[in-house]
Image (tube, grey):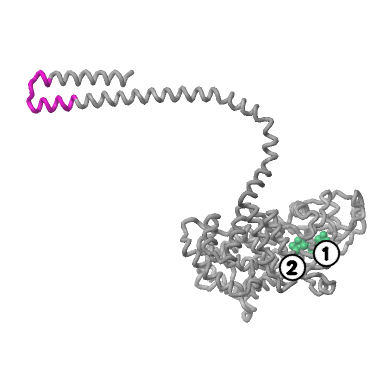
Amino acid sequence: MSQRISRAYKIAKTFLTYGLDEIIPAHWLPWSLRIGRYGLFWMPNKHKQKPAGERLRLALESLGPVWVKFGQMLSTRRDLLPPDIANELAKLQDKVRAFPGEQAQQLIEKALGLNHIDDAFDDFAVQPLASASIAQVHTARLKQGDDAGAEVVIKVIRPDIRADIDADLRLMETLAGILARHLPDGRRLKPKEVVKEYRKTLLDELDLLREAGNAIQLKRNFENSPLLYIPTVYSDYSRHNVMVMERIDGIPVSDVDTLMAMGVNMKILAERGVEVFFTQVFRDSFFHADMHPGNIFVSRDNPDNPSYLGIDFGIVGTLNREDKRYLAENFLAFFNRDYRKVAELHVDSGWVPAHINVEEFESAIRTVCEPIFNKPLADISFGHVLVNLFNTARRFEMEVQPQLVLLQKTLLYVEGLGRTLYPQLDLWQTAKPFLEKWMKEQLGWRAVVRSVQENAPFWAEKLPEMPTLLYDYLKSHRPQALAQQQLLAQMRDAQQRQSRQIGWAAVTCGLIISTTILYVTEQPLWLVASTAATAVLCGAVLWRRTKS
Ligand SMILES: Nc1ncnc2c1ncn2[C@@H]1O[C@H](COP(=O)(O)OP(=O)(O)OP(=O)(O)O)[C@@H](O)[C@H]1O
């Protein structure tokens, strides 16, 4: 408890000494918070001269990894933040100290049930290869099995990190609640939802079995591909807090000088980055969503025909068939400058509600997007197109779609990467044939053939069972059909009876009215009496019929 209080105190102090409270004008805050702020007079803003974005970045850096990662995530939410703050947050770097290698060794031994690390691994390096905010990586070689001798890396989650993360997340949630309540723009910025999304991403990253599963799936998707190599995960040695995988030896993609010196074909490399992305999204519906340069390497083989090596599969994105179709159609419509179609697609897909005015939406998209086309096609950023499009759509009640936000973020990474490698990269020319081919496969006779092909195994399996299924169906449905027939006949009878009663009631009423008129107009008595008698007779028949 005392730990939590001191952490809350440290966070409050950091926020105030970096003047983050001043980002919110005082008159928006309730009096209690304003008095509270005056009460903390010994924590003045010590960075007054710095812009708000920089103060926010420095504050997050000094609060540690959970906040740094949060800032990194926020930097990709260009739909929520002004560009100056988003740019500043994009500079956030993890600066974390390694934890002792001996402690990592104990964690691995405990997780894998080993008496000593040497039982499963040779040459375990106590000195970590890398140390990141959530995990630390050590090198070793496998000792047993078919892959004995293989060079591996062992990723270990930092000890006791869970408690710290939980405590910091709780504080973040409290803060988000305050912001949502007091910021005039609080509803649009959705701070509570943003923190909730962050919680999920962070907790997912803490589970290395999830990451192992993602890596295995990606490897399967790119088996024998010349584009991307995914290292093998050794599942037998993987647990929630430990993962063992093949060690790769590539050149970091950010090391452009070395790549150039090796004579790597940068054009092909850049184009392949785009191709990997579109393949993952449109072919596999499963994409690596943490494609920052630290996680991407280039193979040392074949500099003329280069391929990528990928690591860190903690965050992946998926898209369903509809999302993919609307996305591809959106891109194609956008690049054909068919803004009407873009607007209609947003409504058809349910991304914006059906009641919005499509003409106004179309015009808003044109206003925002048309200036983009003043640039040469090769300079247009797909990522920024999406950012602009979604920002506009938000004004027309588009709800945040987490899968699209992840996609947009990845696209920005991929583009940034592609243009660093090969500044003349024409993303549209690289992606267009891909999208068009995909669209063709989804629509028209090819799609029908594919759907039949996809469902053929199901029908082939069920066909021999068909006669039995049909017989069972008929047998079980016969009594039901008979009961239905009986019910129908009863209903028909009741209906006929009812219409006859209505007929008798009408005649009786008519006769009563006639008797009254005859009596009032002083007609002969015998006529009045016989009409009345007939009315009584009809009434009696009606009474009997209703009783039976
Ligand atoms: N298979 C591998 N082969 C060689 N080096 C690796 C491998 N996996 C990880 N590394 C090294 O370890 C570092 C950290 O790994 P990884 O990115 O998976 O950890 P992380 O905790 O998820 O980091 P972050 O989320 O901050 O990027 C990498 O930048 C890389 O240098």
Callout 2: SS: helix
Instruction: Answer above or below: position of 281 versus 58.
Output: above
Q: Which residue is mark 1?
A: 299
Position of residue 388 measured from the top left corner of the image (x, y, whole percent): 58, 67
Q: Which mark is residue 256?
A: none
Whether 267 is among the magenta residues is no
Residue 186 seen in render: no
Q: Using the rendered view, name the quadrant where residue 21 is placed.
A: bottom right
Q: Is residue 14 left or right of residue 242?
A: left
Position of residue 195 measured from the top left corner of the image (x, y, whole percent): 62, 60
Q: Is residue 172 left or right of residue 259?
A: left
Of 361 and 120, the residue lying toward us: 361
Q: Quadrant of ligand 1?
A: bottom right
Residue 155 seen in render: yes
Magenta residues: mostly which secondary structure?
A: helix
Q: Which residue is mark 2?
A: 270
Of the 4 image quadrants, the one containing the C terminus is top left
Residue in the image at 84% along x and 61% along y: 248
Of 27 and 386, the residue lying toward us: 386
Q: Earlier in the sequence, mark 1 or mark 2?
A: 2
Ligand 1 is within 8 Å of the C-beta of the residue at disc 2: no
Position of residue 207 measured from the top left corner of the image (x, y, whole percent): 74, 54
Q: Using the rendered view, name the quadrant where residue 487 is placed.
A: top left
The residue type indicated by label 2 comes to Ala
Callout 1: SS: loop
Position of residue 61 measured from the top left corner of the image (x, y, whole percent): 70, 70
